[in-house]
Image (cartoon, helix red, strand yellow):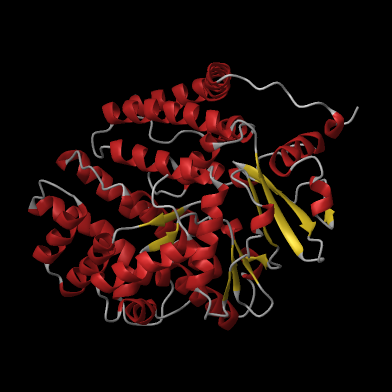
Amino acid sequence: MSDDDRPPRSVKSPRDREANRFGRRVQRYAQVGAGVGGIAARAAGARLFGLDQVDGRTARELKAALGGLKGPIMKVAQMIATVPEMVPAEFASELSELQSAAPPMGWPFVKRRMRAELGPNWEKRFGSFERDAAAAASLGQVHRATSLQDEALAVKLQYPDMQSAVDADLKQLSLIFSIHRRMDRAIDTSEIHAEIGERLREELDYLREAAHMRLYANIFSDDSRIAVPRVFEELTTKRLLTMSWLAGEPILSFREHPLEERNSIAETMFAAWWMPFSRYGVIHGDPHLGNYSVRSDLGINLLDYGCIRIFPPSFVAGVVELYRALETDDRDRAAAAYENWGFRNLSAELIDTLNVWARFIYAPMLDDRVRSVADGIKPGEYGRKEAFGVHKRLRELGPVTPPREFVFMDRAAIGLGSVFLHLGAELNFHRLFNETIEAFDAGKLDKRQSAALKKAEVPLAA
């Protein structure tokens, strides 16, 4: 008997469903604990006894343990790998490769899940559907397909029990952060944990991701350089997202192309990130290189909209204000920007320390000349020296509680800078940035953002 011929399962009571979810969470705790516990203990012990460099073997073991675990724990590991000085360099190098480490689910799983989302005759709603996944990531996998009108499609299917995995993994992350706070008082991670949890839960909702795609399609409707997949609403549910397939090549395959072409790609990437932020208060918050591809005309395809961060206009205003403060070396103006974001108890020393990191982030935009984003710095080392110095000083001045918005703001900024480094691009970032913030007005941004979110039907709360 095939899966499609089996009778429907009996309806379970809410108590039964909750018991099942609790059982899956317990199983998840065991999986994560067994695979990672011993490795993490050795790493923590090394740090505790003053051994700053954890060996490469331990890092490889951790990647292997996490690579077999689909879900948010792997996505958090990828995220941590992009933040300078959060983990040793060996760990960052290994964890950054996790995006391609998730093995896809097999055809029996795909049939069951597609039937659950679109009904028993789901295959008849496609012209074709490839059995083997084209890509597998932390929360789901993508299959190539065609529509009944022979349009190329990308079908993104969420792995089973992801809600339970999120609940379990966020519990584990809370424990990790609480231990971190006891061992290292430089930064209070409570807001970081809250932000990661909120964004991860949003990523489980593919209807929200579809709304994000509509939002970005509207934002870039007049910019032919940037393509956004079209959502096929009739083939999309909360756990299934069907969109147009955008053909392109990986960004890294252009590293040996002429500088003029690499600069063109980098300038488009700059617009794809900074323009939505400065004019609409939103960013594409996942900087992994697999989330972009390059077309034959050197335009880019902007992919994967699960991690979109929407900022209040006051936060965007603070970003512009801090830039102006650094530009004029005005400490009081910088302090006002930090206070506007929610920093408290700002001494002159603390402001100067925060400005070290801010000057690193803003450095290319403050320098009015054609340059690389960070001359002479390798992609894997981008920001590590600055982060180490700031972290060391915050241990003496802290703890500091960064506003939650900084988690994905910093992550995306570092990721974008890494793209420029990989491409070896040389641009006048000062000119490009000032074009995006020219005549900035928080009140106009507020109205523009509200209208754009309403038009795209983006839910305002998870």
Q: Is residue 265 visible?
A: yes
- The quadrant in which residue 249 appears is bottom right
* Image quarter hosting the C terminus: top left
Residue 282 versus residue 389 in the image, above or below: below
Residue ID at (27%, 26%): 182
- The quadrant in which residue 74 appears is top right
Residue 326 versus residue 298 in the image, above or below: above
Q: Determine whether, in the image, residue 86 is placed left or right of residue 97.
A: left
**Front position in the image: 146 or 49:** 146
| x and y percentages locating residue 47 in the rendered image | 37, 29
| x and y percentages locating residue 265 in the rendered image | 56, 75
**Front position in the image: 90 or 283:** 283
Residue 323 versus residue 46 in the image, above or below: below
**Front position in the image: 389 or 193:** 193
| x and y percentages locating residue 317 in the rendered image | 24, 66
Residue furthest to the right: 1
- The quadrant in which residue 290 appears is bottom right
Residue ID at (79%, 38%): 111
| x and y percentages locating residue 452 in the rendered image | 42, 67
* Image quarter hosting the N terminus: top right
Residue ID at (42%, 61%): 283
Residue 74 versus residue 25 in the image, above or below: below
Q: Is residue 424 visible?
A: no
How many numbered callouts?
0
Residue ID at (40%, 60%): 413
Q: Determine whether, in the image, residue 371 is placed left or right of residue 341.
A: right
